[in-house]
Image (cartoon, grey):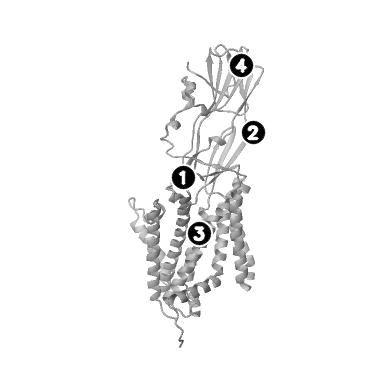
Amino acid sequence: MAAFLSILPLIFIMIIILWLVAVNKRLTRKSLTLRQSKLIFVGYISFLLIATVFSLFLPSSEAKLIKNLTLREDMTDNLFMKAQQGGFSSIDQQRISQSWEFPYTGDSLTLSSDYYDEGILIERTNELKGKIEVYFIKDWQALGVNSVSMDVSEYTPDMDVEMTSDTLMVVSPEEELIIELAFSELAFPMKQMIGESQFGHGYSSSGSRFFYIRVPQDLQIEFSEYLYVDYVNN
Amino acid sequence: MSLTKVSLSNVVLKQYRYKLKAYTGVFMALMVVQVIGILLSIAGGGSGSFSNNVYTLDVTVSSSSLVIVLTMIWAFMNAILMTTKSYREDDFTFVSNRLSYNLSNMVFLLTACIIGAATALLSTGVIRILFYLIHDVDIFLTLTYQVAIGDYFAGALATLLYILLAATAGYLVGMMTQFNKRLIILLPVILVGLNYVVQSNANPGFVNILKFYFMEYSFTVFLLKAIVTILIGSGLAILLSNRLEVR
């Protein structure tokens, strides 16, 4: 699809040139009358108006633009590091995307995943008896598009976890999930009038995305070497 | 010899009405140029992407900026065309002078530019629909709440002024080349040559001229800059046309 789109402008130009060559004789032989020209142009404007009205019903959401990406305090705050240093309770609740609680009385727990390759942080605690708490933390995700950076974290998929006998499985939403977003950028004179630069480029940067699992103190944890698992420094 | 007295405004109005009917090709060309702009805009005006093992997130930019740029080129080319001999001679169908010829041309160009700006801005809707269908877009990210109605109005007026600036530049260049045919070759050579001479690390040459308009973020100052440029350009074009040989 991407390859096709990259040659799309060339295809259009070739079609237009071929069309002009093909109809050239017809055009020179008989030009449009005033009435025909008026009809065509009024039809074009009507088409633009109707399309504008229809476009209002397309699924849309307000873009969350990020100004001064490197200066924002909440964005320099690494949640994974914070949680690893024992500061999980101080993490903003809004950053906790999902949470689960499973009753568990076994001696050992195996962690596994299908495609998940981000961090898993385990906290051993005496506060829990006979249960496991799982949290999925999803922080900001800035994507640089032209001259702006925008937070697109709300469109990234949530994860799921399943407990089967002694295995806690991290489940991805679906294989090869592709999220296609379109940024309706203002035309350059509009951008200029709201004080936004036409030049420069936005930066991409990601915050933390990880599972935080609280388990009883003496529970044995086993996992595959492909999983990135770390422990909280109590 | 006619005993009927005609005022300048009447002559200009007659010529303007005639041009609206005679130059329908200008509007057909606008339509073709904008359709090309719309089709080229579908490829997207930039993109960003993030991918990991679980998902891929793509953001493609949909914008009508290219349509506006092509409309500016259309205005520039049409303004040049209107200064050519064949178009000039159309005006001798009426009782006219150089001033009425220029004024009617300018009013016609203003009308064409207003229509061009309006249709260029309206093309946003078509681009979004085509984007939705071709790119299989899940959701559009917009800036609806971050832009006030006044900003939209200022942006629309700025769009018109950019197209008018292009038309004025075209009209002036057209008059200059009518005044002296050698300027067709000399003008680009002088401009590119001058830019090459003055360009240095401290002075980016033409970029300064672009910055003068494109990086002016105050609407009032931009309005002033654009209107003054249009008035100076139009005045010079009228002066030059007065020096052209009579029919």
Chain letter behind tag 2: A
For the residues labelled 2 and 3, the Cα–Cα distance comes to 45 Å
In percent of width and height, residue B220 lies at: 39, 54
For the residues labelled 3 and 4, the Cα–Cα distance comes to 66 Å
Disc 2 + disc 3, Cβ < 8 Å: no
Chain letter behind tag 4: A
Question: Is residue A8 at least partly visible in the picture?
Answer: no
Amino acid type shown at disc 1: Ser
Per the image, the residue denoted by label 1 is A147
Sequence-earlier tag: 2 or 1: 1
Q: Secondary structure at mark 2?
A: loop
In percent of width and height, residue B164 lies at: 45, 62
Amino acid type shown at disc 3: Ala
Q: Nearer the viewer, mark 2 or mark 3?
A: 3
In percent of width and height, residue B142 lies at: 53, 45
For the residues labelled 4 and 2, the Cα–Cα distance comes to 25 Å
Amino acid type shown at disc 4: Leu
Per the image, the residue denoted by label 3 is B117
Residue occupying the far bottom of the picture: B1
For the residues labelled 3 and 1, the Cα–Cα distance comes to 24 Å
Per the image, the residue denoted by label 4 is A109
For the residues labelled 2 and 1, the Cα–Cα distance comes to 32 Å
Same chain for the residues under marks 3 and 1 in the image? no
Q: Residues within 10 Å of mark 4 (few under 14, many from 20)?
A: some
